[in-house]
Every structure is written in C-alpha cells, then in structure tokens.
Amino acid sequence: MSAADKMELYKSGMMQFAQQDFSGAIELFNRALEVDSGFADAYQAMAHCHEKLGDLDAALSCAQQAVEHNPEDFLAHTSLSIFYQRKGMIAEAESEKALAAQLQQQS
C-alpha cells in the first residue's frame, strides 16, 4: 500500500467518524497505521473515537502515541491534556496544557 492508500483510509475513517460509526472508523485508522505506523493523525483520530466509545484508557494510549509521533502538534498535546484530566491525572494534564500553549504560540 502507498501513501495515497494511507490517506484514503484516513479520509474514509474520518467519514465514518462524522457518521458516528466510531468502531468502523477505528478499523480504518488501524489499516492506515498498517501502512504507516507513525501516522500521528490516525492515532489522534482514534483517540477521539475511543473517547466517544467510552474507553478513556484506549483514548489516552492513542493520544500518547499521537504525541510521540508528532511532538510538535499542539492539538495532540491538547487532546492528551483533556484525556489526562478526565482520568484524574491533573498534574499530567496541566503539564500537557502548558506545552500545548507554548507550541501554539510558536506556530
């Protein structure tokens, strides 16, 4: 599969997300990750799918992967902050929030 295939899978996953088929979207994002295991946007999108499905542990894990693969993305840090906050991990949430704000100012 190619980079174009990866993007098609990602776009299809986003369509599923928009239609509130979060499980179907996760399947497509996972297929995109089979093409490119470092595809941060797929991890970010999967985090929000897991959140919608009520699985905060999986959402947090995916958000951490998104940040790991794209540490300069302030939106990924913002999502990670939100998931930490929802898990009651306030110190981690505040740290990510501050980093997101710093990165946003730089962009």
Image: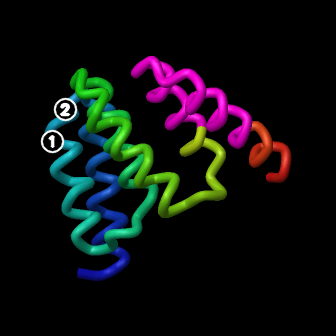
Q: Which residue position is annotated with label 1?
A: 24
What is the magenta segment's predominant secondary structure? helix
Rendered location of residue 90, percent (x, y): 55, 21
Mark 1, Cα crowd under 10 Å, few <14 / some 14-19 / many 20+, is some
Q: Closest to the observer: 67 or 11?
A: 67
Point out the image quarter for the N terminus: bottom left
Residue at figure coordinates x 27%, y 64% from the top left: 32
- Type of amino acid under label 2: Asp
Quarter residue 94 falls in: top right
Quarter residue 20 falls in: top left
Mark 2, Cα crowd under 10 Å, few <14 / some 14-19 / many 20+, is some
Rendered location of residue 56, percent (x, y): 31, 27
Rendered location of residue 73, percent (x, y): 62, 52
Rendered location of residue 77, percent (x, y): 58, 42
Q: Determine if the magenta segment contains residue 17.
A: no
Tags 1 and 2 touching, CB below 8 Å: yes
Q: Which residue position is annotated with label 2?
A: 21
Q: Is residue 65 left or right of residue 1?
A: right
Looking at the rendering, the stretch of residues picked out in magenta corresponds to: 78-100
- Type of amino acid under label 1: Gly
Q: Is residue 65 left or right of residue 94?
A: left
